[in-house]
Amino acid sequence: MKHLDEIEQSAAQLQAMHKKIHATFDESRSAEWSQACAEFHSSYNSLAYPGGLDAGMASLKSGSDDAIETAVQFLEVDPMFFGSGYIKEGLIQHLKHADLTPGQKERLNVVILRLVELQGRREFRRYCRLACRTRSRNLEMELRKHLSSNDPSVRRRAKWVLDALSNHEEG
């Protein structure tokens, strides 16, 4: 798992830079704010994704085994920084068509179940569609258990994934 630490450290750097943008936003500090914005934007591509966001997406689109593994690791780490939801959506879209190993499918199922349990974010619907590619008996069994959760949000997200799996069978 060569990229896990890099993903976490880069996300922390982006979070700090984005925080600095907000901290310097007032008329008396406009030069400082401009500098913070410039630093964030000039660093974003290289920090947002291992090896650079543009290069990583291009490599993933080509179907490289290393790129697929990096994308799976990125989703496992689930970094939170400005724009990370859009990146995750793009990764999920590519992974739906990628040649995933059984181990990668299982790891992605762990990610899906974690998000069912914790929270739904902008990319959650894409995870529902990804589940159709990573489907396993264990995933379905765990999702059915979540239907009896005390938390209505967990029940709703589990139902969304199960509905996606069910609709995929019919389609």
Image (tube, rainbow, N blue to C red):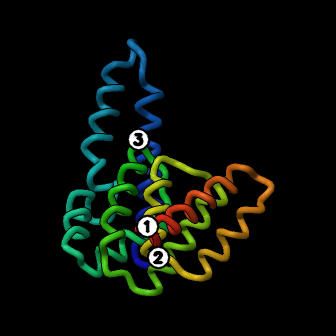
Left or right of 166 on screen, residue 116: right
**Label 3 vs label 1: CA separation?**
32 Å
Q: Is residue 30 above or below residue 80?
A: above
Q: Secondary structure at mark 2?
A: helix
The crowd level at tag 3 (other Cα within 10 Å; few <14, some 14-19, many 20+) is many
Q: Are marks 3 and 1 in contact (CB under 8 Å)?
A: no
Residue 27 pos. (x, y %): 38, 12
User: Does any portion of residue 107 appear in the rendered image?
Assistant: yes
Which residue matches tag 3?
17
Residue 36 pos. (x, y %): 34, 33
Which residue matches tag 2?
134
Identity, as a three-letter code, of the amino acid under mark 2: Thr
Q: Secondary structure at mark 1?
A: helix
Which residue matches tag 1?
130
Quadrant of the rendering where the N terminus is positioned: bottom left
The crowd level at tag 1 (other Cα within 10 Å; few <14, some 14-19, many 20+) is many
Q: Are marks 2 and 1 in contact (CB under 8 Å)?
A: yes
Residue 7 pos. (x, y %): 42, 63
> Which residue is depicted at the point 45% across and 52% down?
123
Quadrant of the rendering where the C terminus is positioned: bottom left
In this view, the residue in front, 10 or 115, is 115
Snapshot quadrant of residue 142 = bottom right
**Label 2 vs label 3: CA separation?**
35 Å
> Which residue is depicted at the point 45% across and 29% down?
22
* Residue sitting farthest toward the top: 27
The crowd level at tag 2 (other Cα within 10 Å; few <14, some 14-19, many 20+) is many
